[in-house]
Image (cartoon, helix red, strand yellow):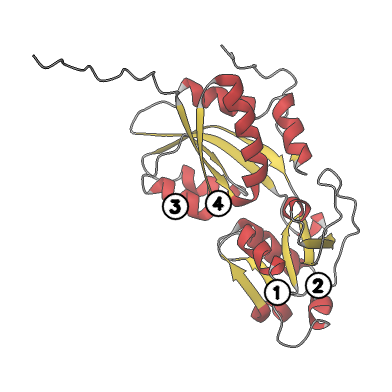
Amino acid sequence: MLALLAAPVQADERPQIRVMAAASLHDALDAIEARYERLADVDIMPVYASSSTLARQLANGAPAQLYLSANERWMDWLEQQAGIVVTGRHDLLGNRLALVAPGPSQLDASVSNAEDVTDVAERLAATGSNTRLAVGDPDHVPAGIYARQSLEALGQWQTLRSRLASAEDVRAALALVEHGEAPLGIVYATDAAISHRVHQIGLLPDSSHDPIHYPAALISRGGDAPSTQAEAFAAWLSSNEAGAIFHRFGFSTLAHQASAAQPDAD
């Protein structure tokens, strides 16, 4: 007789939490997720891209339970889309805009004490007549939208608009400067701090653009409520422990909870 071999029984898979987050959150959120996976025995599945790209993907049915945008505009837009339910929305983090150039960085991500810089056009002109300023696409990428607002407020947009090297997201703009394809770029201060291939010249004045806030929210559709695991992770992002990690990467925390629930590690 042939022995019947039973298929091995696999242990239950850990619950998955699908997250879509702005590209500028990549390094900080990877560290956050690694810590939380150990605490809560879950698998977090992140996707990073421009906030606009992610919002459109969510509207077109991409699966995710948590969305972290780099500006209010794309969270507002997502809330208006049919079939999408946005709950628990709150401003989680803050950031600043930095002017960067190629070269090694000596910055500590927890320190942003550089002088405000207001002479972007003059600095670009000094690099040559055909050089370009790397930015996220100002039509839809949050970092590019903030950059345009700042340059308009400084009276330099008309001079610089034809000399932009527009990128699909802020990390792509950073890469243009890192690789020497652009002599200057406007990115987030947190991007300048994590790169060893650029140095920060200065910070653009906060008063020259809208506040840089990162709203976070749970996403559901079709009458399905967010999972309890996703709700717990969203709450933990505002905890002391998560806040300390965000601070390490240079973000300011806006929704800091002194006693956010600690996940059960059992």
In primary-sequence order, the first of circles 3 and 2 is 3
Label 3 residue SS: helix
Q: Quadrant of the C terminus?
A: top right
Tell me the kind of residue under disc 1.
Ala
Label 4 residue SS: helix
Q: Which residue is mark 4?
A: 51
Tell me whether the residue at label 4 lies in contact with that at label 3, contact meaning CB atoms closer than 8 angstroms.
no
Within-10-Å neighbours for mark 3: few <14, some 14–19, many 20+? some
Within-10-Å neighbours for mark 1: few <14, some 14–19, many 20+? many
Real-space Cα separation, disc 4 to disc 1, in angstroms: 23 Å
Q: Quadrant of the N terminus?
A: top left
Within-10-Å neighbours for mark 2: few <14, some 14–19, many 20+? many
Write the residue at 71% across / 73% down. Answer: 180
Q: For residue 240, which quarter of the picture?
A: top right
Q: Could one spot residue 253 in this view of the protein?
A: no
Residue 16 vertical position relative to residue 211 in the rendered view, above or below: above
Real-space Cα separation, disc 2 to disc 1, in angstroms: 13 Å
Front label number (4 vs 1)? 1
Q: For residue 238, which quarter of the picture?
A: top right
Q: Which residue is mark 2?
A: 120
Q: How many marks?
A: 4
